[in-house]
Structure formats: C-alpha cells, structure tokens
Amino acid sequence: MDGVARRLRHAERADVPLILAFIRELADYEGMLNEVVADEPTLEEWIFDKQRAEVIFVLEGEREVGFALFFHNFSTFLGRAGIYLEDLYVRPEFRGRGHGKALLRYLAQVAVERGCGRLEWWCLDWNKPSIEFYLSMGAEPMEDWTVYRIAGATLTALARPDSR
C-alpha cells in the first residue's frame, strides 16, 4: 500500500448528482464542458434503470476523489465481451497518489472475473500525462485505428428510412 487511505465503491442511485459533477469536471479539464448535455434524470435512467453503464468511485478517507464509468462491449474476434472505460477521472489535487492505478486495477479485476477478453478506452492525443500513465500500466495504443462517430442531427438523419 502506498500509505493513502483509499477504498473503492460502486455508485448508487443517490450518487447521480456526484456522477454528473465528475462528468462536468472531466469535460472542463478536457476543454469540452460546452458539450455536456447529460443531466441527472438521463444519467439515472441509463445507469440505474436501464443498467447500461456502471460507475466506481475511488475515495480518499471518506471523500470521493475520482470515478470510472464503464460498460460492456463485444469483440467478435475474441467471441466474448470486453469492458469499455468511457471515463476515468481523478481530481487534480488527488493525482499522483495511486487512485487512477487503483481504478484501473479494479476494472482489470472485474474484466477477469467476468471472463472478458479485454479492457479498452480512448485518450485524447494532447493528454500527455494520461498517455504516460496508461503506458506505464502496460496499455498499448491502437495506432492503426481511427474512431468514427455519427451523432446528433446526422444520427437522426441516418436513422430515417429514406436516408441514403
């Protein structure tokens, strides 16, 4: 142990405001706060009612200082589910104390316990501290892959039966 009084806990429905606060802090850190449209009712519906994602908090003492939001994806090549880490965030004043490592280690344990074939995530190219951290944990960048996205009005248009 690194001397920090740390524990992890799964989010509960009453934590929705805290989840949203962490999402907003992460978005602000990434310079994308204006893109956050999530609200408490939406998060409650998708995380707790529909159970489409899970959240783990890392606590220092009795205070939540970071979180990880993840869900299952599926690899056709492996023929099994994986875990996709959507967000991992530790508040700046608590970084360097092993909290991010504890969250990643826990997610690796969850993946192994559930029989998943992999744990994966995206990282912004400019986020050098996070990239260095992930590389130090043994992560491998997927340099031959490009992320594509269809969202918003483009998604709605594509969903129409008459779209081309």
Image (cartoon, rainbow, N blue to C red):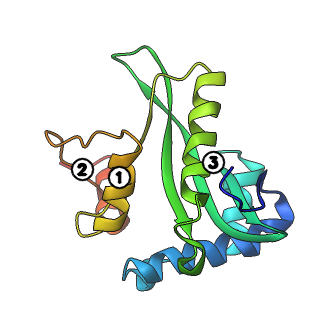
Q: Residues within 10 Å of mark 2 (few under 14, many from 20)?
A: few
Q: Front-most of 22 and 146?
A: 22
* Residue ID at (59%, 54%): 69
Q: Which residue is mark 2?
A: 147
Up the image or down, 133 lies above or below 66; here it is above
Instruction: Name which residue lies at 39% across and 15% down.
Output: 78
What separation in Å lies between label 2 and label 1 (alpha carbons)? 9 Å
Give the image quarter of residue 52: top right
| Disc 3 to disc 2: CB gap under 8 Å | no
Query: How far separated are the C-alphas under marks 3 and 2?
Result: 20 Å
Q: Is residue 124 above or below residue 53?
A: below
Q: Residues within 10 Å of mark 3 (few under 14, many from 20)?
A: some
Query: Which residue type does callout 3 highlight?
Result: Ala
Q: Which residue is mark 1?
A: 122
Q: Secondary structure at mark 2?
A: loop
Three-letter residue code for mark 2: Val
Q: Nearer the viewer, mark 2 or mark 1?
A: 1
Tell me the residue at 42%/44% (across/down): 137
Where residue 110 appears, as percent x and y from the top left, is: 64, 33
Task: Check the image and name the residue furthest to the left.
Answer: 144
- Residue contact at pointers 2 and 1, CB within 8 angstroms: yes
Q: Secondary structure at mark 1?
A: loop
Q: Earlier in the sequence, mark 2 or mark 1?
A: 1
Residue to which mark 3 is pinned? 53
Cα distance in 3D space between marks 3 and 1: 16 Å
Using the rendered image of the protein, determine whether residue 160 is visible from the camera's viewpoint. no
Q: Nearer the viewer, mark 3 or mark 1?
A: 1
